[in-house]
Amino acid sequence: MVGFLASLLAIGFLFGAEVVNGAGSTFVYPLLSRWAYFYYKERGVRINYQSIGSGGGIRQITNRTVDFGASDAPLTPKELRRKGLIQFPVIIGGVVVAYNLPVKDLKLSKSALCKIFLGEVKFWDDPLIRKFNGGKKLPHWRIRVIHRSDGSGTTWIFTNFLSKSCKEWSKRVGFGKAVNWPTGIGAKGNEGVAGYIKRFKGAIGYVEFAYALENKLKYALVENREGNFVRPSIRSFQSAARFARWDERKGFYEVLTWKGGKNSYPITGATFILLAKDYPKERNKKVLDFFFWAFKKGDGEALKLNYVPLPKSVKAKVVKYLKGWLGD
């Protein structure tokens, strides 16, 4: 299907099809690719999206080299004003802790995750890991930490979770699209991290849920704010998203990590689309036509790839705000 999509888009390009250019989040790339395929079939408009990481997406829309950016790290109202941008959420998903071990349903506490990524827990049979995994035969393998090497919204979400759940991480490392990792090997993109985890025995890293499923990676149940070990799933992402407060006056800024609720997955996040305020109305309208179409017709594909569509009420709020901003 991917090869057919590439051929279809190439034909559209050669014959002068209308093109909308975007760049950013690798988190949302699997879904945007599917939406772009069906949108082209229906409307004849080609969505050319570069999966370069949230940092790259923010940089390109800030430099006005693309029609839209996509980031899993929401910009604050102050950042939006400074860069002359607006943002809105488009989809919700989760970052999973994937690993390469001959063990299923591994449970990882907030303390274990903190110390693994700080480089303080070095072997898989460490007592801190064994504590919540009674009966599982954990090998005495060295832990190989894999993290992103590029500016990444997935990193932002994961390190934001670590900062909220672990004081030591917050003091020593903090959170951001790029951080000074105390240990580990860097890889580019969600696909790069997934590839390294698949390749190295004893590896652990963080990837968007769709990449873990696509690469058939094992992923952990993670301790949440209520002390429960929660499996990543559409339902546990939805549980976390129920606590969101989407406020257009704040540029829809919202962080979904470490939310309350006994069934909430603690490393849930959203992808935000960034538009330039100083672009001509028609240029921004072409971008919004695509995302309004996705809001109406894209939920099925989102669910197939284990993303969570925005609730209807949130979509309506976003559409009303954006149409008002455009003057439609």
Image (tube, rainbow, N blue to C red):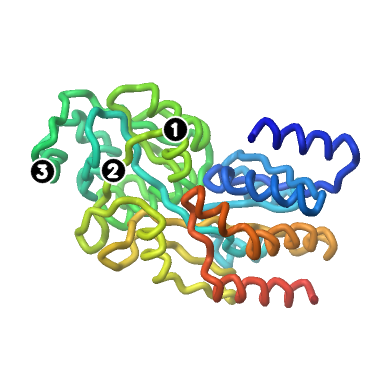
x 59%, y 61%: residue? 79
Of pointers 1 and 2, the one earlier in the residue sequence: 1
Hey, what amino acid is under mark 2? Ala
Residue of label 3: 131
Task: Choose the circle earlier in sequence order: 2 or 3.
Answer: 3
Q: Earlier in the sequence, mark 1 or mark 3?
A: 3
Asked whether the viewer can see residue 167, the reply is no
Assess disc 2: are there few (<14), some (14-19) or many (≥20) residues with their C-alpha within 10 Å of its C-alpha.
many
| Mark 1 touches mark 2? (CB < 8 Å) | no
The residue identified by callout 1 is 215
Residue that mark 2 sits on: 220
Q: Nearer the viewer, residue 306 or 162?
A: 306
Task: Specify the amino acid type for callout 1.
Answer: Asn
Q: What is the CA distance from the residue labelled 1 to the residue labelled 2?
A: 15 Å
Residue 200, image quadrant: top left
Measured Cα–Cα span from mark 2 to mark 3: 15 Å
Report x, y in % for residue 87. Answer: 63, 63
In the image, residue 253 above or below residue 160 = below
Q: Which mark is residue 321?
A: none
Q: Nearer the viewer, mark 1 or mark 3?
A: 1
Q: Residues within 10 Å of mark 1 (few under 14, many from 20)?
A: few
**Which residue is at the front of the view, 275 or 27?**
27
In the image shown, does 264 or 306 lie closer to the viewer? 306
Name the secondary structure under disc 3. loop
Of helix, strand and loop, which one carries label 2? loop
Q: Compared with residue 288, is residue 182 higher up or lower down, i.e. above or below? A: above
- Between disc 2 and disc 3, the foreground one is 2
Residue that lies at the very extreme toward the right in this rendered image? 15
How far from the left and from the top, in percent, is residue 265? 33, 57
The amino acid pointed to by label 3 is Lys
Q: Is residue 154 left or right of residue 109?
A: right
